[in-house]
Image: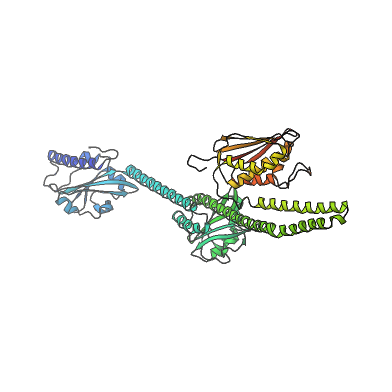
Amino acid sequence: MVVHGEMSREQLVAEVEDLRRRISELNKEQDIWSGSGEVPEAPSFAYHNPSPVVRFDSNGTVLTINPAAVELIGPEAMEGSSLVSVLPVISSLNVEQTIANDGQFSFEAEVEGRWFHFVVVGMKEYGTGHIYGYDITGRRRAEDALRASVAEQRRRTRDQETLSNIARIIGSSLAINEVYERFAAEVAQLIPFDRIVINVNADRPGYMVDAYQSSAVEVPNRAPDHAYAIEGTLSQAVMVSHRCIVFQPGSENEADAGYAGLLGAYEMGLRSFLSAPLLYRGEPIGCLNLHSLVQNAYSERHRLLAERIAVYIAGAIANAQLHAQVTRQTDELARSNRELEQFAYVASHDLQEPLRMVSSYVSLLGRRYGDQLDDRADKYIHFAVDGANRMQRLIHDLLAYSRVGTKGVELMPTDTVPLVRETLSNLEVAIGESEAQVVFSDLPSVMGDPSQLRQLFQNIIGNALKFRSESRPRVELGAKQEGDQWTFSIRDNGVGFDQRYAERIFGVFKRLHRDADIPGTGIGLAICQRIIDRHGGRIWAESKLGEGSCFYFTLPAVAEHGES
């Protein structure tokens, strides 16, 4: 049987049985295995077989060998030669025992760069054995390629799992110093190193500082948190080029000529250097540096992995820096708020008391010596008392403004109808004097601070009564729901203002009307702005000079379960 191509193990076993049967038949038909002891020519099925075939005796001597075997093995494949010399791969074969026991076994071996499946068959009846070789080079190469492909896929899977672990570690905390150690341990699973350094930009241009380093080798002049110039260093080259660089010098001179900054590391035994830029929003903020004591330790695969890893740690460092900046600003804001509270305390006590004394003594002076003073003196006394009173009102309003963000209670479901009624009760005198009409329909419940909302309504409605026109004042309150917020409106028919100044009126001390007969400090609407800011809403106004104004503001609605 002529065998072509590749065969399965079951097919090979069947082939061996068929060979045994055919050899026996041929020997009987041709009587070539008579007891004469002579070695006849090989049967034609073996001689012309495209696969190598060797027949041997119990002494391990080659009896016949077909052309395919000669072509494979070479000139030394001669009849009468030692079987082991012809096929060293069967050196462990006990040919005598194989023939005596009608032995049969198979194995795979490489011969002259080709792989064969060898089948050994012992024929006790004839005192000979046969070796048949089936070329399985294609199959072995396919198997090797498959194994390599599977190994590569497993490696990529492991790499991806490690990269995912790195991303998870980096995202686990804003405390970057807690992240570095775990990060380095995961990087070691992907890229070998004996030293890892993460350096970031220092406050001084052209300088960097090591934010983290872990090393089995001590490199001189590279203490953590010590700023150093990067002129001529690998870090500078990486920062300028925005790409990962692998540098593996073969000598000290090559290291010095390439990047002088690495000379100290080279002298300490480090031989391979890999540096990747830490880019945040396209700008370099530092470098990830990996060093190895092994020459040529880093490949293109390592370079690409380092670029991906650098993206992760760059984002973590930038976030940590931003968090630190926000923390500093928050601390500064807290300190500023404490100073503002201290100022409010001083304003409410230390400043108001002298003003009360000035006002009291000037008033006493007017009452006691009024009949001895002329009209001009009375006028001066009036101005002094009025100035002191206005200063007291101003300090009171400033104190109220400063306390909006610090003295409020937690927002709660609040019915605005009772608040408006209380406001109108507080403004009863002003409403009566102006004969004003205040109209409102059903107003909603909102999430708010009742005390501050009362002040909000009182300031806006009070302004509508103060800045009235010649007509009888009319103030209309309304509200409509828009999503999870209520938009309130307070419309009046007062003097109005130029719409160009609609944003200006909410600033501290901003008054559009200079009429001395209209009292106020210019802080009322600024307080309203702070109240609305605290409630997470917005406030604005629409007006036309001489035609009245309408103030709008939004407040959070009360959800079904009582929370906004």
423, 319: nearer the viewer: 423
169, 485: nearer the viewer: 485
In the depicted structure, whether residue 272 falls above or below residue 534: below
Horizontal side, residue 536 vs residue 382: left or right: left
Quadrant position of the N terminus in the picture:
top left
Q: Position of residue 358 (x, y in %)?
A: 77, 58
* Residue for point 69% across, 50% down: 397
Q: Quadrant of residue 361?
A: bottom right
381, 455: nearer the viewer: 381
In the depicted structure, whether residue 155 falls above or below residue 488: below
* Residue for point 75% across, 45% down: 519
181, 8: nearer the viewer: 181
The figure's colour scheme reads: rainbow
Q: Quadrant of residue 235?
A: bottom right
* Residue for point 54% across, 65% down: 219
Residue 366 in sight here: yes
Q: Quadrant of residue 493?
A: top right
In the depicted structure, whether residue 504 falls above or below residue 306: above
Q: Residue furthest left?
A: 35
Residue 277 in sight here: no
Tally of marks: 0
Horizontal side, residue 72 vs residue 495: left or right: left
Q: Position of residue 159 (x, y in %)?
A: 43, 50
Q: Position of residue 396 (x, y in %)?
A: 69, 52
In the depicted structure, whether residue 351 falls above or below residue 30: below
Q: Position of residue 278 (x, y in %)?
A: 56, 52
